[in-house]
Structures are given as structure tokens and as C-alpha cells.
Image: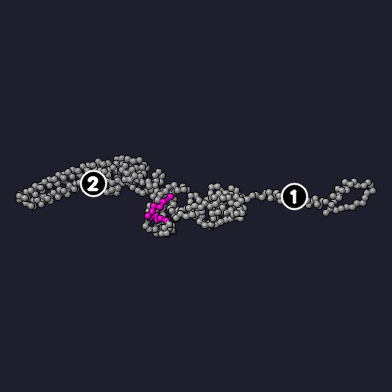
Amino acid sequence: MGTLTLRPPSSGAAEPPACSSFRRLRCSGAPIVLLLALALVGCQDKAQSQAAAPPPPSVTVAQPVKRTVTDWDEFTGRFEAIEEVQVRARVGGFIDRVAFTDGAIVHAGDLLYIIDPRPFEAVALQAQGQLDDARAKEELAKRELDRGLTLVQTSAVSQQVVDQRRQALQAAHAAETQAEGTLKAAQLNVEFTHVLAPITGRVSRHLVTPGNLVQGSESGATLLTSIVSLDPIYIYFDVDEPTYQRNSKLWFQGRRPSSRDTANPVQVSLTGETKPSHEGKMDFLDNRLDVSTATLRSRAIIPNKDLSILPGQFGRVRLIGSAPYEALLIPDVAVATDQSRKIVFVVKDDNRVEARPVVLGPLDDGLRVIREGLNPEDHVIINGIQRARVGAKVTPIMSQTLGGDKTPPGATP
């Protein structure tokens, strides 16, 4: 409060009315004016603070997709050729010519190498002469036997002579058979001088150049090259024991066919691929588990029309692991990790965020199967998880590409 000072009236003229009124207002109303000014300043600050508060962050939400899915078990496998041949020399000699291009596709019966055939042709010619001589001796022995059988009826010769001639015919026939075998062996050696492709496939490089001496099969056959078939191709993979037991139970329950008697479909993705690019079918299951790894060796056969897959490559094999069932699916990016558990963020009716623990299943066509923890009507945050805080409000925006067309309360369609 201000201090009012009383002064005696002056002896001069009277004070003007305006000055008197101003002095009274200043003395009696100053505190009120000050309070009004302070109140106005406080209201202005409050309004400014309310205007500066940011709105709830925007997040994209979607309802889980409900559809029929089938679980797939995934394994790492290696491709191997169905047929693989190491081409070796069957006869020894000097290489005359290499008749193929390194790394080319060859067909069964194509010429690969020529070994100098002249020594073997000479041996075959000699064997042919021995055969002709044996045949002539057999013919002579047969005639003498026929003559002896005629003469024995008139006792011109004894029975002993007939028996000797019969034995001579048998010996001549045996000699002819031996000569025929020798000739066939010689002819085979001549044939083996032309090394042919035994299967259709891709040939490796030539390991022996013309002019070099190679050894035949009788003394350690020389390796000339190799051929592998490419279409179709095998992929081998190992199934762990728990997966094998689970699939066996499904088979006993009639919920899944066994790969032992059914060509179950498989999907294969190559190294660097995110989606399967090849399809095939099961072809083989081993008859025992490997005691050192507790796995079962399995095999699938994959078409390889474009010959893009080579033996030795790795691949990821997907094999049917369950019967078809109804499941809820969400994008995999919507799943977060909270220490040892998996969670998703759900927007409730009041637009507040809730963390929901879930049990995950496999990926299916780019979406993650949720086994437990979600309901079909839940609105899951699929974009903007980093802006969401548990218990805080958000502005949900319904995704147009996942889930239904129902807009949650307070959401922007």
C-alpha cells in the first residue's frame, strides 16, 4: 500500500479539481491496477503453454490378416549331380586328338578323345586271321567225322577212329570259340580308342593334351576329364531329430503325408535370394539317423531347365511341416524384442499404446505368423514404432494394404 501524506491548505489559491482527482486515484487504485496486470500476464502464459504442447505422434496401424497357412520347415542343403562320371582311358596309348570344348554341354555318345588306334587295329587283324584258321580246321574236322561215320557202317574204319575224329571236331570248335573271343577283345580295344561321353551333361576341362601317353584300365586308368548331369539336380539336406519326430507324429495322426512314400513338395532359394526361386519334390529319406549329428539325411530333386544351378552350390530348402490351419499374420517389422520375449504394440480404443507379448510362428509370403497374443480385431502398429510409448496416446492411421477396412476409434482413415 502507498503512504498518504496530509498537508495543510496553502494560503494561496485553491487546488484545481483535476489534480485532486488524479491524486485520489493514484493513492487508492494503484494496487488494483497492479493485480489486474499480473492476472493478464498469467493467463497469457497459460494460453501460450497450451498452444505449444505437441499433438500425439502419428503411427500406422493395421489389423492382423487371417488366412489358411501351412508351416514350412527350413534347412540348409547342398546341390549334387544325379549322375557324375570320371572319364578314364580304357586302353593305353598316345592321345591323338581332344574333340570337345572345355566346359561345354556334351551328350551321351559324343566323341571326347581319340587314342592312337593303329596298334589295336593290327591286333584285331591278327585275331581275325586266327579265327579264320580255326573255322577252316573245324570245317575239316566236321568232314572227316562225317566220312568216318559212313565208313564205320561197312567196317572200313574202326569205331576208335570215329571217336578220335569226333574229339578232333570238338577241339576245332573250341579253338574257333577262343579265336572269336580274341577277335572281340581286339575289336573292343579298337573301339575304346575313341573315348565317348557316357552321359549327357557339362564336361570339365581336358586333363591330357594330344601327344601324351595314357594308361589303360589294366594298369591304373588315366583320368581324362569328368562330366556331371545338371537337369534335374539333387539337393541333399539333414533333418534334425525333433523335426523328424514331429513330422512322424503328424503322419501317424493322418495330418501330413510321409516323404518316404509321397513326393512332398519343396521350395528352394539360392544364396542371396530372399524368396524361393525353384520348386521340386522329395525323393529320398535315409534309413537311419547319423549317430554323430542326430540328423536324417534327406534328398529332393529339383528341375534345372536353365542349367543355372551347379553341383556344389548351397541352397535353403523349405519342406511342409504341418497341416493347413487358420492363423493371424502381421508384417515382420511390427515385431519388437523386449529382452527375451517378442512383443507388438497395439493401439487401444482410447488411442493409448499397449505392449502385447506374442508367440511367433514362421514367415508366410512375407508376413509373420502369430500363434498367441493377438486377436483379429486388434490394431497393431506396423509403422512408427519408434514414436510409440507404452501408455501414451498416438494418432493412429489405418493402413490401406494390410488388414480390414474398419477404422479404429479416433484413427484417420
Left or right side of 404 for 295 = left
Question: Which secondary structure, mark 2?
Answer: helix
Residue appearing at x 35%, y 45% in the figure: 227
Q: Amino acid at mark 1?
A: Val
Question: Which secondary structure, mark 1?
Answer: helix
Q: Amino acid at mark 2?
A: Ala
- Is residue 265 one of those drawn in magenta? yes
**Which class describes the residues within 10 Å of circle 2: few (<14), some (14-19), or many (20+)?**
some
Q: Which residues are magenta?
A: 256-267
Question: Where does the image place residue 246, in percent across and percent down from the top left?
Answer: 43, 58
Quarter of the image where the N terminus is located: bottom right
Question: Where does the image place residue 55, in percent across and percent down from the top left?
Answer: 64, 49
Question: Where does the image place residue 73, in percent across and percent down from the top left?
Answer: 45, 54
**Which class describes the residues within 10 Å of circle 1: few (<14), some (14-19), or many (20+)?**
few
Q: Label 2: which residue?
A: 185
Dividing the picture into quarters, in which one does residue 298 lie? bottom left
Residue appearing at x 82%, y 51% in the figure: 30
Q: Nearer the viewer, residue 294 or 395?
A: 395
Left or right side of 100 for 47 = right
| Tag 2 near tag 1, CB within 8 Å | no
Q: Label 1: which residue?
A: 41
Residue appearing at x 26%, y 43% in the figure: 191
Q: Could one spot residue 7 in this view of the protein?
A: yes
Dividing the picture into quarters, in which one does residue 243 lie? bottom left
Residue appearing at x 35%, y 44% in the figure: 201
The Cα atoms of the two marked residues, 2 and 1, are separated by: 120 Å
